[in-house]
Amino acid sequence: MQIEEVTAIVEALLFSMGEAIALEKLAEVVEIDKSTLKKIMEQMQEKYEQDHRGIRLISLEGAYQLCTKPEYYEYIRRMTNKAKSYELTDVLIETLSIIAYKQPITKTHIEAIRGVKSDHAVNKLIEYGLVEEKGRLDGPGKPIVFGTTEVFLRYFGLSSPEELPVLEDKILEQIQKETENELQMKLEEIL
């Protein structure tokens, strides 16, 4: 099969499915080895980025999806007359950051880090599609563990959670000090 034909087939599959498809599944359907298909996918990504097009091909943890380029979102919003906007408050951003960096993580662990109940924040992040249940721990009570979703990766322009920026020790120390100060202030208000 010619590269152009494989490219056309993959493009048709991704367009018709409308969601991310694993490289293994694409290779199986197209009947081509994964390493060759991966090279073709990388060439397709480059071509979509170089050409002046409204779509791009993104990679999400070993899966691929066609999606709209962010710079054209405003036109789509005008066409559909509804914006899907999320209000990520400081609490939600803090909770999402904890989940992103510590995943898979239980709600109890999130609350231990934040120092407050996190039911509302976790539920809101699930509602927004940024976080999902990833399973249960094999321990007492079998607590649910949470992690980020493909929506999170797309929203933040990442291919996988491993692409999250590494936090420097200075920043971590500063965050820890600020958290301790906030907790101290809250304790003083209570007392």
Image (cartoon, rainbow, N blue to C red):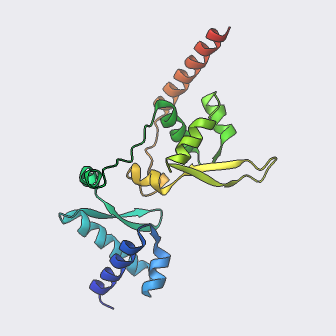
**Furthest residue toward bottom:** 1
Decide which of 181, 9 is in the foreground and name it: 9
The correct choice, above or below, for 154 with respect to 51 in the image is: above
x%, y% of residue 92? 51, 36
> What number of labels is visible?
0
x%, y% of residue 27? 45, 81
Residue at 65% across, 33% down: 111
Residue 167 showing in the rendered view: yes
**Furthest residue toward right:** 140
Residue at 69% across, 49% down: 144
Decide which of 84, 10 is in the foreground and name it: 84
**Furthest residue toward left:** 52
x%, y% of residue 18? 41, 68
In the image, is 47 to the left or to the right of 64?
left
x%, y% of residue 174? 49, 25
Residue 32 showing in the rendered view: no
Q: What quarter of the picture does the N terminus occupy?
A: bottom left
Residue at 51% across, 31% down: 91
Decide which of 191, 38 is in the foreground and name it: 191
The correct choice, above or below, for 141 with respect to 20 in the image is: above
Q: What quarter of the picture does the C terminus occupy?
A: top right
Residue at 40% across, 64% down: 59
The correct choice, above or below, for 47 with respect to 70 in the image is: below
Decide which of 172, 54 is in the foreground and name it: 54
